[in-house]
Amino acid sequence: MNLYYRPDIPTWEKYTKNTELYSIKNKLHIEIQSKNIPGTIVYDIMPGFFTDFRSGPSIVNPFIPKIGDTKTALAWLIHDVNYHGFLSKKYADLLLLEMLENAGMGKVKRNAVYYSVKFFAGSHYSNLDDDQGDLYNHNKTLVRMQWLDNKGATIKRFNGKSLITAEAA
């Protein structure tokens, strides 16, 4: 996996209306080349995007961090972004698994996370055009995503308002 992100130290703060959520404070630019997904995926996430980082009960926090270091936090964040429908659920879950490996999480822990989301998180996955409620509909407007093939041509692009695929371009 190749992972590039700016700034070097992303910042967030707890959202005052919901103690399980965090608000991203600075624009994040993230580029990912994955062994499981062809090409390069580029995300620009604007300030104000809400995430809970790692979902699940706090009882697992001592074993699997809610936020963790920067690479772990980005894995949780990108998974949250993708569950809005930017990638298929299958690709979103595989990318999470690979990003956790890249972050240095051990095989047992990352597989526990992967199989948990693979089998139990389906109800949280939505398509881009689904009405996901005010907070999550707002979140979708704060993401620009571009999926490039291995030659740099656009496969899929989301500009904060609409999805544009190669077939539609």
Image: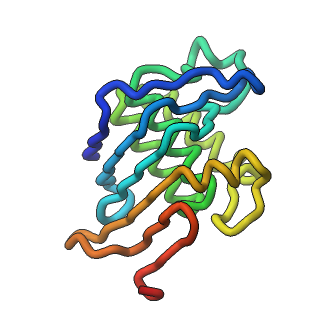
Q: Is residue 94 left or right of residue 1?
A: right
Query: At 27% across and 42% down in the image, what residue appears?
Result: 4
Q: Quadrant of residue 27?
A: top left
Q: Is residue 120 left or right of residue 85?
A: right
Query: At 31% across and 39% down in the image, what residue appears?
Result: 5
Residue 160: x and y in percent read 53, 61
Q: Report how many numbered discs are placed on residues in the image.
A: 0
Residue 85: x and y in percent read 60, 61
Q: Quadrant of the C terminus?
A: bottom left
Residue 94: x and y in percent read 48, 51
Compare residues 114 and 19 and report the one nearer the observer: 19
Farthest left residue? 151
Query: At 51% across and 38% down in the image, what residue appears?
Result: 47
**Colouring style:** rainbow
Query: At 71% across and 25% down in the image, what residue appears?
Result: 20
Residue 38: x and y in percent read 33, 65
Looking at the image, residue 3 lies above or below residue 64: below
